[in-house]
Image (tube, helix red, strand yellow):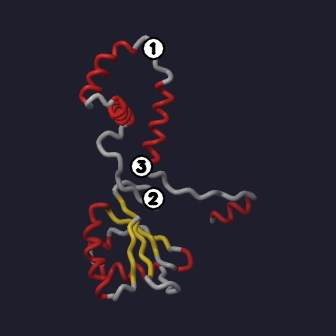
């Protein structure tokens, strides 16, 4: 579909990934920097006492005190990074790649779904909603819930033993 749009419009679209949390935080910090240019010098004296206390609380490290302040203003002060799907951008999701270990072996979505249903029966397999094929049937990518990562990896260790390493999973 994208190819059709590009052809009809006579343009080439650049594909970019979903912004990751680090990118969002950096962008937020730059936005704060722009906003700080609008702060009136008349209000600065009202903050000096608290600023001095903050620096003192950080063992005299003014840079750390400033970083704490910027983190709080940006809203990224509790946890900087949450997992985010590379497929949908949904938070608290991890994107996994399932691919054959040996080059040249084809693995389409149906074959991957069969493997997932077989090896990850029940809720683990049922929670996989979106699957996308890798170019030339080189495997698939899919999302799992962040809190299920260890269960998937435990199952994967079992699969490696049973399948003699024919399948490989990678978490992005």
Instruction: Tell me if I can see residue 168 in this picture.
Output: yes
Q: Position of residue 20 (x, y in %)?
A: 44, 52
Q: Residue at x 41, y 59 (%)?
A: 85
The residues tagged by marks 3 and 1 sit, at their Cα atoms, a distance apart of 33 Å
In the picture of the structure, the residue carrying the numbered disc 1 is 41
Labels 2 & 3 near each other (Cβ < 8 A): no
In the picture of the structure, the residue carrying the numbered disc 2 is 88
User: Residue 21 — which label?
Assistant: 3
**Rendering quarter of residue 112:** bottom left
Local packing at callout 2 (Cα closer than 10 Å; few below 14, some 14-19, many 20+) is: some
Q: Nearer the viewer, mark 3 or mark 1?
A: 1
* Disc 2, SS: loop
Instruction: Tell me if I can see residue 129 in this picture.
Output: no
* Disc 3, SS: helix
Q: Earlier in the sequence, mark 3 or mark 1?
A: 3
The residues tagged by marks 1 and 2 sit, at their Cα atoms, a distance apart of 44 Å
Q: Position of residue 103 (x, y in %)?
A: 50, 84
């Amino acid at each position: 579909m994208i190819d059709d749009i590009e052809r009809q419009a006579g343009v080439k679209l650049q594909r970019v990934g979903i912004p990751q949390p680090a990118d969002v935080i950096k962008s937020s910090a730059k936005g704060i920097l722009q906003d700080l240019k609008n702060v009136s010098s008349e209000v600065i004296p009202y903050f000096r006492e608290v600023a001095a206390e903050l620096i003192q609380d950080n063992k005299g490290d003014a840079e750390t005190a400033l970083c704490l302040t910027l983190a709080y203003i940006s809203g990224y002060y509790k946890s900087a990074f949450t997992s985010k799907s590379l497929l949908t951008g949904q938070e608290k999701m991890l994107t996994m790649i399932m691919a054959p270990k040996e080059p040249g072996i084809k693995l389409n979505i149906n074959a991957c779904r069969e493997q997932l249903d077989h090896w990850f029966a029940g809720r683990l397999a049922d929670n996989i909603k979106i699957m996308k094929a890798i170019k030339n049937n080189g495997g698939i990518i899919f999302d799992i819930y962040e809190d299920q990562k260890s269960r998937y990896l435990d199952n994967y260790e079992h699969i490696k033993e049973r399948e003699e390493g024919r399948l490989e999973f990678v978490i992005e």
